[in-house]
């Protein structure tokens, strides 16, 4: 599915699977209040520009599974779906 959003500079758009509740072995339903910190990079900016005008290439690529710091993300809606937008510098790593 194509997304109608192109992040600028070093921003990364992340899709996070929202998991709202878990069920224990005993059948108790527990609401998941943990903040997400992993997702899939669905759109990636071109990278920051240096003062000379050249681009610093992005390490994160579209389709990478990433771990990020939750406090650094902005929640945005694109095509009626919620995504997270964060600078690449706030991504802790690529999960292989």
Image: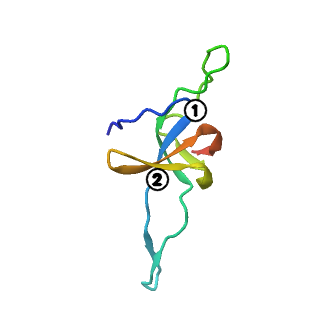
User: Which residue is denoted by mark 2 in the rendering?
Assistant: 16
Pick the residue in front: 87 or 23: 87
Say whether residue 75 is left or right of residue 2. right
Give the total number of marks visible in the rendering: 2
User: What is the distance, in whole Å, between disc 1 and disc 2 at their CAs?
Assistant: 19 Å
**Are circles 1 and 2 on residues that touch, CB within 8 Å?**
no
Question: If the image is split into quadrants, where does the C terminus sit?
Answer: top right
**Disc 1 designates what residue?**
10
Count neighbours of disc 2 (C-alpha within 10 A) and say few if under 14, some if 14 to 19, many if 20 or more. some
Where does the image place residue 70, in percent across and percent down from the top left? 59, 54
Name the image quarter holding residue 71: bottom right
Looking at the image, which residue sits at the far bottom?
A: 26
Query: Compared with residue 26, is residue 64 higher up or lower down, i.e. above or below?
Result: above
Indicate the secondary structure of the residue bearing disc 1.
loop
In the rendered structure, the answer to whether residue 38 lies left or right of residue 90 reads: left
Residue at (57%, 32%) from the top-left corner?
10
Where residue 78 appears, x then y in whole percent? 37, 44
Dot 2 falls on a residue whose secondary structure is loop
């Amino acid at each position: 599915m194509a997304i109608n959003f192109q992040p600028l500079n070093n921003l990364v758009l992340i899709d996070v699977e929202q998991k709202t509740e878990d069920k224990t072995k005993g059948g108790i339903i527990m609401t998941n209040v943990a903040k997400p910190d992993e997702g899939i990079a669905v759109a990636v900016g071109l990278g920051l520009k240096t003062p000379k005008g050249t681009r610093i290439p992005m390490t994160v690529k579209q389709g990478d599974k990433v771990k990020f710091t939750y406090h650094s993300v902005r929640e945005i809606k694109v095509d009626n779906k919620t995504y997270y937008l964060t600078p690449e510098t706030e991504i802790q790593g690529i999960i292989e």
